[in-house]
Structure formats: C-alpha cells, structure tokens
Amino acid sequence: MTETLEDSTARHAHMIEAAIAAVSSRKSWSPFRDSPSAKFHAPGAPEAGKAAFHAQLGRPFNLEQPAIVGRSGAEISPFTRQPLGIDYPVSDPSALIDAAQAAMASWRHVDPEARIALCIEMANRLYARNFEMAHSVMHVAGQSYTQAFSGSGPNALDRGIEALAYAAKAMRDVLPAVRWERTFGKEDVSLDKCFRLVPRGIGLVICCASFPTWNAYPAMFASLATGNPVIVKPHPIAILPMAIVVQTCRNVLADYGCDPNLVTLAVDTLEAPIAQRFIDDPAVQIIDFTGSPRYGGYLERTVTGKLLYTETAGINSVVLEGCDDLAATATAIARATCLFSAQMCTSPQNIYVPADGIETADGHRSFDEVAVALVAAVDAIADNPSVAAGIMGAVQAEPSCQIVRNLAERAAQNPDARILRAPTSYPHPDHPQARTMTPLIVALPAGNAALYAEEHFGPVMFIIAATDRNAAVEEATRLAREHGAISSYLYSNDDAFIDNAITAYEGSGMNLSINLHGAMWANFAAAYSDYHVTGLNPAGNACLADLAFVASRFRIVQNRRPTSRKADAHAA
C-alpha cells in the first residue's frame, strides 16, 4: 500500500464533512447506492459477488488471528435448509484481549482524523463487497436479496458513518492545547494546558442474528474512531457477515501499517457461549449489545463500571384512529408487518382500532371492516409468492415458527379471540426448501394482555378492539413503558388528537410515525436523519446515533504547567 495515513485522511475528508453536514441538517444524504440494480454498479459486480459467496461455501474462512485454538461453524441457510459448511478460526479469549490491548497502545496516538479516515476506508471496501455480503446475509438471516443488499449493506454502513460524524464532532470539540491567563491579586498567572483524548478500553460488539451488521457498524466505528480496539462477537448462527467485516477491517489496518488486531473475531457456539468471558474481563470497558431482552436486561442489571449500549426489542404498535383511504392505510401497515417476516426491531405487532370503528374519507368503517381490510392487505402480499419472496424472505430459525404456532393454539383456546388468518408457509419461487411463514392475524378485544403484551419474534398481527381512541393510545404507551418499544405508528385525521397522542408517546420514550403511506416503508429509518431507539424505555438504553453514543468512548486527561520564558520568547 503506497498511500499514507495522511493521504487517506485528505482523500476521505470530504465524506466526513458531508456526513457532519447531514447530521446537522437532518437532510437526506448517503455516499452509497442502496439498490442492487446493475445499472448503479460496475459491470459484472452482481455476478462476482454471488460467485464469491458460493466459492466460500464448504470451505474454511481465511482469517488470520492471534492464538487460534480450533475452528467452528454450524450455520444453516433458511433458504436451502442446508449447512453452509464454513468454519471459522476460534481464538483463545485471553489472547484476543492481550492482542487488543497491545494494539491500542499505538492506535490511541494516531490522529483522530486519520482514525476516522481509516473507518471510512473500511466502509468503502465493505460497500465494494456488498453483493457478496447480500448473499451472505440472506443465507444466515433469511432476509430477501433486496433487503439484504440495502438494509444490511448501505443502510447499515450509513449508520456507521453517522457514528463517525458524531465522533468527529465530539473529538473536535476538545482543544488540544491552550494558553490560560488570569490575575490572582498582584500576580499574573499564565499556564499552558494540554488536553489529551484517552480511549476507554477494549470494545466488545455482540451482534444479533437477524440483522448482524445494522448495529455492528456504528458500534465498531464509534469505538475505533475514538481510539479503542474492537472484539466482534457474532451470533453463532450468523457468523459469515461479521467474518467478512472483520476480514475487511483487518486488511485496511494492515495496508496502512496499523495493527490488524485492533479488530478481531470471537466465534462461539450456542452450546458454549463466550460473551460473558469478555464482559467480565477488566480490560473490556465498552459493550455494545444487540439481541434478546432477556440477556440485554441481565446486562443492564449487572454490568457496572463499564459503558454499556443496548438495543433489544419491544412491543411496537399501530393506533388506527382514522384515515382517508382505508385500503392504502391497511397496505402500509401490512407491508411493515410482513417485511422480513416481522423479524425486525421496527415491525408493528399490535394494531389498535376503536371498537366502534373509524372515520374515513368514504365514511364510517366498523371494526370488522377495518380487520377485513388489514387481512386483505396481508393476503395481497402473502398469497403472491414472487411478492412474498421479495418482502417476507425466510424465517431465520425454527423456534420463531414454533412461537407463532403456539400462539395460534393459545388464540384458538381463547373465547374472546378470532383467528382471521392462520399462519402458513408460502412457496418461495427460487428456493423450494425455504423456511417461510405468513402472518398469524388475530382479532380480539383489549384486556387480553396475556396474548399480546409481549413481543413475539415472528409474523404475528393482533388487531385489538380498544374501548376508544384514547384508551388505544393509553395502552400502547403503557406497554411501551413496561416492556419497551422501538417504533410506533399512528393514523388519524384529527390534529388535536394527534397532538395529544404525541405528548403521550413522548412520555413513553417512543418514536412515532404519523400517517405514513406510499412508496416509503413506514418502518424505514433514515440514517443521518431519524434517531433509532430513544434509550427511554426497556427496548434499549442507547440511540443510533447521537453524541451520547460516542462521546463517552473517550475521556479527556489534561496536564498544565506555568508558561515558560522560552515559550514566551518564542511566541514574541
């Protein structure tokens, strides 16, 4: 590599400045294309990416790391139901920690702007591998090809660069040195003060299975930019995407003469999890966790003296109080529910409708008419295999299917509940063996919290008959306060009702989308503009991304001394 760190810093300066401008204006911006259409990419790129993925199947993943003590890997594609046949190096945890500490010794002294530039270089090289990444995410998570390309590629990389923008803002706010002068009595005092940015320590990034890159990129880049090494702990059933990320990041570091052990991979198994080994080590000072509320809650209760950033899950809701076009509104809700078979942190589950119905531009619609419209909108997706394949993809793991089946049995035994749509598989047009499941839709009156007052990780829609519109908002926000929520949705034509609802949702720490229809998915979150998770309810304690997400990953240590006569003479 002939380019120096200084050259890289200069070459990437425009991108970090554009990112800072974007987070400052909250306007739409991205350096990447999130469409897999061949017209936006170099000739042959889609085919080369697919070929790279297939060439990796059945082979050891090439990743040089410290103290490799074995190999492991047991990923199974949700689309083919066949093992990927890839194994990954397993390194001794103590050796990874020692290597990270050794790497940090020099990394902390690299100019912050250069560290940011290398992270941008990592993002650019990952984007260059995005067709390969799309197939990798597909076959470990179950996302459709289009969603894997966009949501786990450019959209996730944007979140990473967004974190870099905030890291730049936070670090630039600290002056490196200053001359301080003040008179005490008859004595003039002059001090030279220096302020050093000191990293906190090793960052551990614990990735989720369904969207491994989405939270990993901002966590990794936030820690690396602020001077901290990173150990990446992928979910055992979704290793390949993060192995590609770690491999790419290590190559960038090595190319620029930096220690590649600033980024390492910690592989484990479902039977022998290893995250706690890192969490308990004093050298690990930053923990980014994405995953189940159970383990996330445990970490929030037990991790002390360290930085902990969590995103878990919650009960996302829709309050449908009124609308102009019922069919269009039902379509928007159905699309958000069906996307990735409701295996997303933004998927709505509970749909509240006043028991006496709603008002539309075409007149009053009863609760049952609203329910019929919602079912029809889901049917339009689920009953068309080519549409379903592009939207719903596959269900990542069999336990999610079993959750939905068990819920259907419980609903069938509840005298208040009506199953409007049973969960069934759909025939995937490209992968006949794919694990698929269309949504279970249950209509029931409010008060049946035993069925719907928890997140069910799979394709489920509850249509809940609320006493009235205010009761709908009250229950939706109360469940968010108690169990967490990441995204919430409201449809209404009554501005006064909307204003009152906004206050209630704010009080529960819930982001709210109001009257979203059309081409943009209701649960799409735009990097640089939308804040993802508030940290104000049990669904997570951190936001992607804001200054709080990065500013504590470094601390400021100062030294000061009287201004020397030599320095005064030089200044003169």
Image (cartoon, helix red, strand yellow):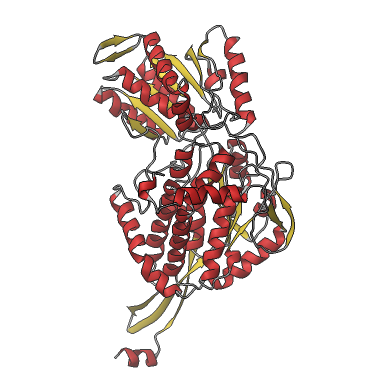
381 relative to 6, above or below: above
77 relative to 567, above or below: above
- Which quadrant of the figure has residue 278? bottom right
- Which quadrant of the figure has residue 334? top left
Q: How many marks?
A: 0
Residue 33 x/y as whole percent: 37, 49
Camera sees residue 347: no
Determine the residue positioned at 40% across, 12% down: 372
Determine the residue positioned at 45% across, 31% down: 391
Residue 418 x/y as whole percent: 51, 9
Camera sees residue 401: yes
386 relative to 76, above or below: above
Tell which of 372 and 73 is nearer to you: 73
Tell which of 451 and 34 is nearer to you: 34
Residue 474 x/y as whole percent: 41, 23
| Residue sitting at the far right | 69
Residue 128 x/y as whole percent: 45, 55
Determine the residue positioned at 51% across, 37% down: 143
